[in-house]
Image (cartoon, rainbow, N blue to C red):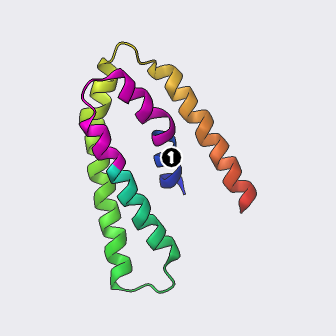
Amino acid sequence: MELTIHAQIEEEIFYPAVREAIKETDLLDEAEVEHASAKDLIAQIQEATDIDDKFDAKVIVLGEYIDHHVKEERNEIFVKARAARDLDLVGMRDQLAARKEELMEELGTMA
């Protein structure tokens, strides 16, 4: 769930703000495609009724996607975001934390 929430708040808040603040958005396009692939794998893992070889493979590939995604964010996207003059990263951090809390509460009431 945490991974799904993380992806959702990035897509709702972080990516749109960074997209407006930087010129090169190819990395953001790639990140959004990576999110879609990760969400698809997460759904397949959650819906699995049998633990088989493909289940293990899906978990491994999801881990590899996430490792790759995190490296790109740290080494490229975050660097560009920090360099953007019109981006309020502190304010965005607070928005991200508030939205994460909202989503966690929603999930808590659904469980």
Task: Indicate the position of residue 110 as horizontal and vertical percent values.
Answer: 72, 60
Residue 70 visible? The answer is: no
Taking the spot 52% from the left edge, 75% from the top edge, the residue there is 47
- Residue 25 is inside the magenta segment: yes
Task: Indicate the position of residue 4 as horizontal and vertical percent values.
Answer: 50, 54
Task: Indicate the position of residue 6 as horizontal and vertical percent values.
Answer: 49, 46
Q: Pick the quarter of the image with the N terminus.
A: bottom right
Taking the spot 28% from the left edge, 33% from the top edge, the residue there is 25
The foreground one among 98 and 33 is 33
Element at badge 1? helix
81 to the left or right of 4: left
Task: From the image, give the main secondary structure of the stretch colored magenta.
Answer: helix
Where is mark 1, residue-wise?
A: 8
Q: How many C-alpha atoms fall within 10 Å of the one at disc 1: few (<14), some, or many (≥20)? A: some
Q: Pick the quarter of the image with the C terminus.
A: bottom right
- Write down the region rendered in magenta: 11-32
Task: Indicate the position of residue 57 as horizontal and vertical percent values.
Answer: 31, 75
**Rendered position, 9 above or below 4:** above
- Residue 107 is inside the magenta segment: no
Taking the spot 26% from the left edge, 44% from the top edge, the residue there is 71
Residue 108 visible? The answer is: yes
**Rendered position, 37 above or below 100:** below
Amino acid residing under circle 1: Gln
* Quadrant housing residue 81: top left
* Quadrant housing residue 23: top left
Taking the spot 70% from the left edge, 50% from the top edge, the residue there is 106
The foreground one among 60 and 49 is 49
**Rendered position, 11 above or below 93:** below
